[in-house]
Image (cartoon, rainbow, N blue to C red):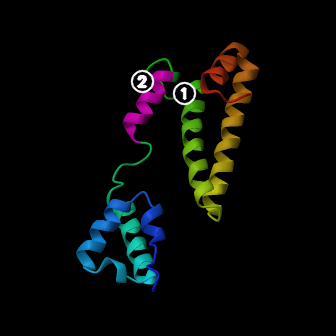
Amino acid sequence: MRREKTHSAVNNSPLAVVYCQLFATFAPDFQRVSHSAERILARWITHYLLLYTKNTMYLDSAKKAEIFAEFGASATDTGSCESQVALLTYRIQHLTQHVRANHKDYVTNRALVKLVGQRRRFLAYLKRKDIERYRAIIKKLGLRK
């Protein structure tokens, strides 16, 4: 008796519903779809979803205004050390997730290291000038353990 193939890419993917719908549309006999065709279709779907469903940037002007309002004196206070450190922290967290997923992306890794260094310089300045503000921003952002 012939063993039926298990479609691992379909079963383990969070896009299982989309895969099944496309397989049902393009391949009426679902059990006979080869693994190579499955991989090609899975890659195409992932590429399509990444390109066309992600239409917003991770850091838009509304998010910046929200960060500045929370950590600065007002939503238009873009130059204070606290608001700059908060903005850099947000960008660092985003890039850290990207570098973890794409470990060979050396350009982004270098940009991440530069941002961390810039944040360190802001924090060093703040620590020199006003230790209470430094302690407050560190506690609010949860940077030091």
* SS state under label 2: loop
Q: Residues within 10 Å of mark 2 (few under 14, many from 20)?
A: some
Quarter of the C terminus within the rendering = top right
Query: Farthest residue in the bottom direction?
Result: 1
Q: Quadrant of residue 102?
A: bottom right
Residue in view at x 64 percent, y 61 percent: 103
Q: Choose top left, top right, bottom left or bottom right for residue 129.
A: top right
Q: Looking at the image, which residue is at 54% across and 27% down? A: 83
Q: Is residue 56 above or below residue 129?
A: below
Q: CA distance from mark 2 to mark 1?
A: 10 Å
Q: If you read the primary sequence from the N terminus, does the residue marked by circle 2 or circle 1 appear first?
A: 2
Locate residue 142: give its quadrant: top right
Callout 1, which amino acid? Ser
Q: Is residue 86 above or below residue 118?
A: above
Determine whether the residue tagged by mark 1 lies in a helix, strand or loop. Answer: helix
Does the residue at mark 2 contact the one at mark 1 (Cβ under 8 Å)?
Answer: no
Horizontal relation, residue 49 to residue 112: left or right:
left
Coordinates of residue 54 in the picture (x, y in percent): 36, 54
Residue visible at 45% across and 83% down? 36
Q: Nearer the viewer, residue 28 or 50?
A: 28
Q: In the rendering, which numbered label is found on residue 75?
A: 2
- Does 104 appear above or below 64? below
The stretch drawn in magenta includes residue 1:
no
Q: Amino acid at mark 2?
A: Ala
Read off the residue under disc 1.
83
Q: Is residue 142 left or right of residue 127?
A: left
Most common SS among magenta residues: helix
Q: Residue at x 47, y 29 (%)?
A: 67
Q: Quadrant of the N terminus?
A: bottom left
Magenta run includes residue 67: yes
* Residue range (magenta): 60-70
